[in-house]
Image (cartoon, helix red, strand yellow):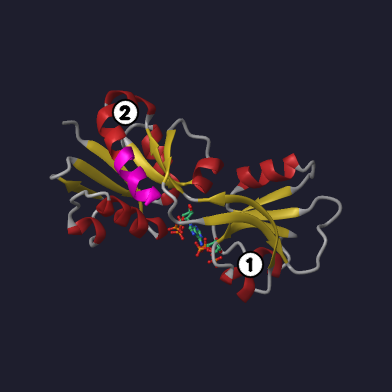
Amino acid sequence: MDELTIAMPKGRIFEEAYELLVGAGYDLPKELDDSRKLIVEAPNERFRFILAKPMDVPTYVEHGVADIGIAGKDVLLEHDRDVHELLDLGISACYIATAGLPNTEMNEVTPRIATKYPAVASRYYRSKGEQVEIIELNGSIELAPLIGLSDRIVDIVSTGRTLKENGLVEYEKIIDITSRLIANPVSYRLKQQRITELVDKLREQVTR
Ligand SMILES: Nc1ncnc2c1ncn2[C@@H]1O[C@H](COP(=O)(O)OP(=O)(O)OP(=O)(O)O)[C@@H](O)[C@H]1O
Ligand SMILES: O=P(O)(O)OC[C@H]1O[C@H](OP(=O)(O)OP(=O)(O)O)[C@H](O)[C@@H]1O
């Protein structure tokens, strides 16, 4: 039986992804959930896990150093990677929206949009026929309109708490986001049986 290398996102998505795999009946070692190790073997399942930053998961999978991985749809939309999307896992649900200070119009000349998702934001405003200047930030995006760096932000909203506590309002929802199971195209061909078995078990969990 082939060993499968699985790229798992550290951080927010990890816990739900881990529970999904355990719920699907896989016997995973405690150290996967409970250590700082970046490579963890699950010998009983012939899985090897690599723990990656969520944004990097599709990179490992595209290059084939991981056969499959779990990534947010936001990451897949932002970076066009050559990977197969096999299953919507329904976990870590959130959405991408535009937001800004309440009761404000966007600058008429070239509105400035701060975001961690420049490709998603550009596509969105282009689809509306609006010309904007994208300002890329790596976090604390909500700061930008508060200190006059941008007219709007394009960012993830989950509970809405960050917007609310910073006196910002949502303007338009762009797209719903959940995490997806992705596969390297070559691995998918060569290890199809193992991967399909995993997809079927996870699908059962997701639809329960
Ligand atoms: N409230 C949220 N904010 C950001 N991402 C969320 C949220 N809810 C669910 N997600 C999902 O979690 C993923 C991000 O996870 P996480 O915040 O752990 O990573 P990160 O953005 O790289 O964090 P950091 O850079 O702060 O370590 C996103 O790709 C998205 O799919
Ligand atoms: O609607 P909420 O539940 O408040 O979640 C949304 C917030 O969470 C994320 O930020 P994160 O905590 O990842 O910090 P960051 O600003 O460093 O990216 C996201 O960028 C929003 O700021």
Residue 36 in view, yes or no: no
Nearer-N-terminus badge (1/2):
1
Q: Secondary structure at mark 1?
A: helix
Tell me: 180 left or right of 130.
left
Region rendered in magenta: 199-208
Residue pointed to by mark 1 = 143
Q: Of the residues shown, which amino acid type is indicated by label 2? A: Ser
Q: Secondary structure at mark 2?
A: helix
Tell me: 30 left or right of 18.
left
| Residue sticking out furthest to the left | 44
Tell me: 54 left or right of 51.
right
| Residue in the foreground of this view, choosing between 173 and 106 | 173
| Residue sticking out furthest to the right | 108
Residue 169 in view, yes or no: yes
Instruction: Give me the disc on residue 187.
Output: 2
As for residue 194 lying within the magenta part, the answer is no
Q: How many marks?
A: 2
Q: Of the residues shown, which amino acid type is indicated by label 1? A: Leu
- Point out the frontmost of discs 1 and 2: 2
Percent across and percent down for residue 119 are 62, 42
State yes or no: discs 1 and 2 in contact (Cβ < 8 Å).
Answer: no
Within the image, what quadrant is residue 45 found in? top left
Percent across and percent down for residue 54 are 42, 50
Q: Residues within 10 Å of mark 1 (few under 14, many from 20)?
A: some
Instruction: Give me the disc on residue 64.
Output: none
